[in-house]
């Protein structure tokens, strides 16, 4: 690890990828490395150094460096927003939104998508090697916050030579990062688009996260977080955590529409504990697929960061004060059937922005797809995103 | 096990109770034993014999045998509705509703409360001894349905010499049993009170149950269901299952009112995975307390019975046909903030009863306590129950 920052951009087409084994095994993304001269000072008071960020970019930075858009990912997401995922081989998680001619148009904009600090796909996290021990950090990794994730992203943006972002866009935990960007670096964000998110995590959401963490930590293969050194992985615990979370990403009506009470087999009930209902086998599949691409300790750290998020806390509990004097233009989006991050959550942010005299628009989109709607085919959402980004680009003078 | 039925009513004050070890260790309740001459024919086609039912009674059966009220318990409930629980030492789960002078008045009515088949507090279930092997049944216990639970209860009611019940009352899974009673034995139910329930389990509810089952089965101490023979218990898996379920029993607003985002310690965030938030330690406590009184395999079987419940299925999918010609009078109750069994679920039953020309009243009660409201202090609910039971008693001529 050198004291200066450097890029090692490598070919994304790596077939023998092994997830969650630290930075050395992540050649599929560009890496920004920050040495001892550029430590990451965390909200906890701890200092992370050296550290690195794995990221992808799409499109070309213009000469004036005014066309950069930062994409922030959600809990189970990563930097592979608009490229084939190197582990799963599936399309990027936001290819509906990002690409040539898409609402976030990579023919016009330089799009940056980075893996969060604490993550497991190239950025330093609990599966990275702890320089003090030569072993994976495990639970010795410091607890990070949404503020820390954003502070690290700002260092990446510096590293890329970009002073001001045309837009920061993200949904769910990504939306929390967008809000944090607007508060931490108001002069660096021209336009902010927090989608299906909240200024703080609710008691119910903390409760669901706690169930997931307990499921992971109850798995004997977790080994107090030292499973990588033990050559095991708490796969069953992580799968249960993912299953529980996945239910919260869908609405009751979307589950009903997708599965109803339909049985797997037309013969009917097996009178056993096999996956009789389609929804059961769907959930089992979701759980099993997740453990192939996600690190269990990262799941603990990233959920914890979301739980700790409370944007008003540093402003005497008054959210509007967080946005005082902001010149950033905001566009918030919520979805009617999202019960994890409700319209009321978005409205609370809108009210605070109004009280702060900020420029804000808000769209509640009719959808029965629940929280996941922000990742799915929602034409109205795409149109709003395109319009908001276009208007920002026009104002800034980006062609 | 004799071929005839017999009662062994014992003292409920047993200090050294060990849960989930089969019938021999359950002297705290009355037991109705059914021998080879009285097998329980299950919906799966299997036959359970011999079997027994653990039950409690409160009050006195009148000479005309017309004042009996059957109470049906929910998933995590048992027969100890109105007496101190022999394991936990806590008040019965429905002492708010049942007792001298209470809405279900034990000074006037003979109240029967039985443990469901598949349960773990005296009724035959997966922790009972399999007569074929001399070992606990484990997964060799046949999968049972709500219909099977009710069929067994009907045999208990026969055994007690009661032809017709003044009322059958229950919430959640108990409400499913009430509906099943009204359909299976319409002439034996004068009044039926299904509370916070549905005629079939939704895809979302099946999904939450599946997460709980997977958490149990992922625990290595589950041993394919043979943990009693291995002298272990999947405590961690069962605790996670209970935690996930418990969130669904509360509303977001009740969680918020109870806990908000309040931290355990006024010092603030620990930047660790300790239970920083009160809601976290509350959930951990709920999980741990549950495993002391509930058998993990029973949890699998009873959740499965709920998932399979679909009252209309045997009637060409038309719920009204299930109630055709019913003389039973119904009173349904739902709670506004219950998102597990919604007002829409109750309304669907009311519509079917109306279409069948049955006598039905329905109350949606304003409450922010979620599904658990039916177990809590809800004066309007108590008043409705008292009025409905009183009216039934007057009509039948019970003083």
Image (cartoon, coloured by chain):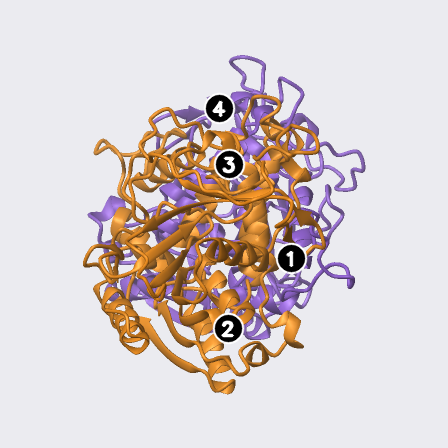
Chain colours: A purple, B orange
Disc 3: which residue? B295
Disc 1: which residue? A279
Instruction: Look at the image and tell me in which quarter the N terminus of chain B lies.
Output: top right
Element type at marker 1?
helix
Position above or below: A139 against A235: above
What is the distance, in whole Å, between disc 2 and disc 1 at their CAs? Answer: 33 Å
For image coordinates 44% across by 70% down, the residue present is: B189
What is the distance, in whole Å, between disc 1 and disc 3 at their CAs? Answer: 25 Å
Disc 4: which residue? A139
- Residue A107 circle label: none
Could you tell whether B144 is left or right of B60 in the image?
Answer: right
What is the distance, in whole Å, between disc 4 and disc 1 at their CAs? Answer: 34 Å
**Residue B21 in view (yes/no):** yes
Q: Are marks 4 and 1 on the same chain?
A: yes
Q: Are marks 3 and 4 on the same chain?
A: no
Q: Chain of mark 3?
A: B
Disc 2: which residue? B186
């Amino acid at each position: 690890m050198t004291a200066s920052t450097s890029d090692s951009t490598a070919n994304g087409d790596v077939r023998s990828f092994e997830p969650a084994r630290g930075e050395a095994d992540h050649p599929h993304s560009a890496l920004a490395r920050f040495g001892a001269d550029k430590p990451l000072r965390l909200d906890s008071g701890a200092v992370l150094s050296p550290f690195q960020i794995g990221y992808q970019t799409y499109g070309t930075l213009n000469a004036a460096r005014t066309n950069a858009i930062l994409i922030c990912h959600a809990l189970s997401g990563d930097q592979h927003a608009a490229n084939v995922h190197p582990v799963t081989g599936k399309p990027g998680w936001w290819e509906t939104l990002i690409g040539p001619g898409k609402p976030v148009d990579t023919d016009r904009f330089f799009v940056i998508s980075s893996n969060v600090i604490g993550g497991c796909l190239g950025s330093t996290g609990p599966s990275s090697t702890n320089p003090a021990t030569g072993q994976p950090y495990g639970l010795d990794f410091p607890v990070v916050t949404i503020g820390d994730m954003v502070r690290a992203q700002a260092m990446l943006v510096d590293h890329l030579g970009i002073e001001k972002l045309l837009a920061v866009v993200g949904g769910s935990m990504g939306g929390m990062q967008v809000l944090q960007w607007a508060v931490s670096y108001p002069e660096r964000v021209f336009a902010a688009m927090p989608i299906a998110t909240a200024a703080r995590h609710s008691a119910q959401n903390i409760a669901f996260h706690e169930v997931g963490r307990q499921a992971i930590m109850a798995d004997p293969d977790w080994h107090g977080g030292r499973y990588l050194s033990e050559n095991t992985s708490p796969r069953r615990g992580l799968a249960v955590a993912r299953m529980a979370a996945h239910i919260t990403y869908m609405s009751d009506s979307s589950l009903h529409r997708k599965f109803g009470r339909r049985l797997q087999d037309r013969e009917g009930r097996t009178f056993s504990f096999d996956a009789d209902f389609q929804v059961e086998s769907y959930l089992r599949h979701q759980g099993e697929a997740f453990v192939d691409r996600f690190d269990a300790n990262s799941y603990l750290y990233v959920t914890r960061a979301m739980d700790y998020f409370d944007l008003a806390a540093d402003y005497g509990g008054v959210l509007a004060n967080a946005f005082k004097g902001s010149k950033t233009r905001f566009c918030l989006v919520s979805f009617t059937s999202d019960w994890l991050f409700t319209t009321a959550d978005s409205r609370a942010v809108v009210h605070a922005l109004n009280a702060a005299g900020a420029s804000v628009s808000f769209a509640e989109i009719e959808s029965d797809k629940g929280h996941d709607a922000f990742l799915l085919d929602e034409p109205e959402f795409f149109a709003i995103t395109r319009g908001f980004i276009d208007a920002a680009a026009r104002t800034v003078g980006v062609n």
